[in-house]
Image (cartoon, rainbow, N blue to C red):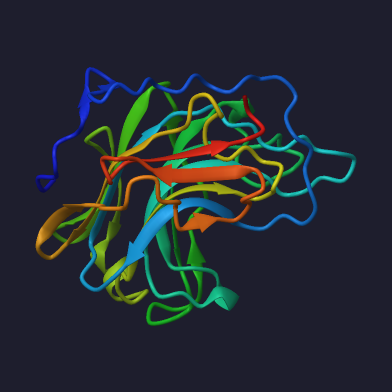
Amino acid sequence: MNARWPSLLIGGVLALGTSLTVPASAAAWANCQGVSQNKYLGDGRSGAGLKGVYAEIEYVNESPCTQGATKVASWSLSWVSLDGPQTPADGVNIFQGGYAKCPDPTVGSCPWNNGVTYYWVFYQRETGACGIKFTTPFIKIANAATGLHFFQISKVGSNYNFYIDEVFKYARSASDLDTCWPGVVAVEYQDEMLNNGDQGGGTVSNHQLFGNVQYQNGSGWHLENHASGSACSANSNPTNWRCAWDYTHHNFYPWDNRAP
């Protein structure tokens, strides 16, 4: 992997003193609400020449919404991604990976894994230069461990590689992104939910950390640089979800105001 800006972490704890988030309680969570669709809490950027994305994301045992008699789509994910040009009517061009917390198998949104949060990776292309729309399944890599974990996707030779904690886990051929999409036009660092009842991020008292957030282009790796206290650019449910950047300008913290 190419050299990035060094981590702010020392022995698993931020040098500026922020503690790690305690996993959310397993107690009953908010009920599912209304129509389910992809909802986001985080940030990203668009631009020419993008080829890598990186974030140190804190494990949070997020709670999918509590189902009623009629099942609705639900999940709580945390991930980084490379994105291609989008035509929403035909899916999305995306290569992403991170944590997944999925509802029971009767819901069917993503693999349940017996309710255990796990690391996953996913690729999709729209219909285009390489034929009809193609989608991998949710690819489980392993059960997630508590603490803070490093997620990276970057172009290395003829592949785009996905890494967890600096260890290679999965690859797509460069042509899958550079030709089939065609090309990377954006990077994202996100929590993703499907229902407003799903937990987004950490708790009120202990926000989730997206740390040392970076993107890569032809001139190398670059730290994100946002104003201290500024809100994240993506928030699909501002009534319940919050997200803000801290004074380092390259860490942000999502949380759910229903979780004390």
Quadrant of residue 229 within the rendered picture: top left
Q: Is residue 41 left or right of residue 97?
A: right
Which residue is pictured at 54% across the width and 69% down the height? 91
- Closer to the camera, 175 or 258? 258
Which residue is pictured at 44% across the width and 52% down the height? 232
Instruction: Point out the image quarter for the N terminus.
Output: top left
Instruction: Point out the image quarter for the C terminus.
Output: top right
In percent of width and height, residue 56 lies at: 31, 36
Report if residue 161 is visible in the image.
no
In percent of width and height, residue 6 lies at: 14, 37
Q: Is residue 218 left or right of residue 235?
A: left
Q: Is residue 232 left or right of residue 199?
A: left
4 shown above or below 178: above
In percent of width and height, residue 241 lies at: 59, 44
Which residue is pictured at 61% across the width and 51% down the height? 238
252 shown above or below 60: below
Toward the right, the furthest residue is 69
Q: Is residue 206 left or right of residue 215?
A: right
- Closer to the camera, 123 or 186? 186
